[in-house]
Image: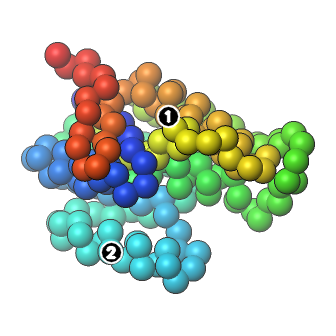
Amino acid sequence: MTRTLVLGGARSGKSAHAERLAAQSGKEVIYVATAAAGDGEMAQRIALHRAQRPAQWQTVEEKLALAQALAAWRAPHRLVLVDCLTLWLSNLLFDGGTAYPDVGAIELPPRFHAERAALLAQLAEPRGDVIFVSNEVGMGIVPYGAITRVYADEAGRLNQAVAALCDRVVFVAAGLPLMLKDASC
């Protein structure tokens, strides 16, 4: 069982790299999509991603219950590719139409903590190969607004926690992968 995290910025090539790794695995690929088409622009992005994936890959759409999806689909003969963790994080933060203040402390929804813990517990189980795609959002300026700062903080914490449990961690910039961790060596 191999667990891989592929990180990168927007349009870095991280999804394309993760998809190449999945295709090279020789296993049945289950693509878990966390995006939701909230507007026309996002619907176009989703359609483009779908069109670029091999036809034999099965797509599972899951906005919130990612650990449950992993539990259902992980198996020794499969590779589950999750794209992406930061969209999933955003879905959890804004599930139920939660409105956050521009300034001050932010209390995260209880489901956020439960789903995050469930994901990390599921990742610790040896049940089949998995590749996670996630945005690295902490390399720029500190964002304006309380919820944007909380999002950047939680994305960084999530990436660290997932990376700690993964066998391989790859950072992609300008389409070029840089191996950060490879426990198989």
Q: Amino acid at mark 1?
A: Asn
Q: Which residue shows up at 70% across the image and 59% down it? A: 95
Closer to us: 82 or 44: 44
Count the labels in the image.
2
Q: Position of residue 56 (x, y in %)?
A: 17, 66
Does the image show residue 12? yes
Residue 109 visible within the image: no
- Vertical placement of residue 162 versus 45, above or below: above
Residue 96 horizontal side relative to residue 64, left or right = right
- The residue identified by callout 2 is 48
Q: Position of residue 100 (x, y in %)?
A: 83, 55
Q: Residue at x 46, y 31 (%)?
A: 162
Residue position marked by numbered label 1 in the rendering: 159
Q: Sequence-wise, which precedes: disc 2 or disc 1? A: 2
144 vs 128, nearest the viewer: 144
Counting from the top left corner in percent of width and height, residue 157 is at 58, 31
* 151 relative to 23 in the view: left or right: right
The residue under the point 87% across, 39% down is: 105
Q: For the residue carrying disc 1, how many other residues have a C-alpha within 10 Å: few (<14), some (14-19), or many (20+)?
A: many
Q: Secondary structure at mark 1?
A: helix
In the image: residue 56, left or right of residue 111: left
From this view, report whether residue 61 is shown above or below residue 76: below
Dot 2, how many residues are within 10 Å of its Cα: few (below 14), some (14-19), or many (20+)?
few
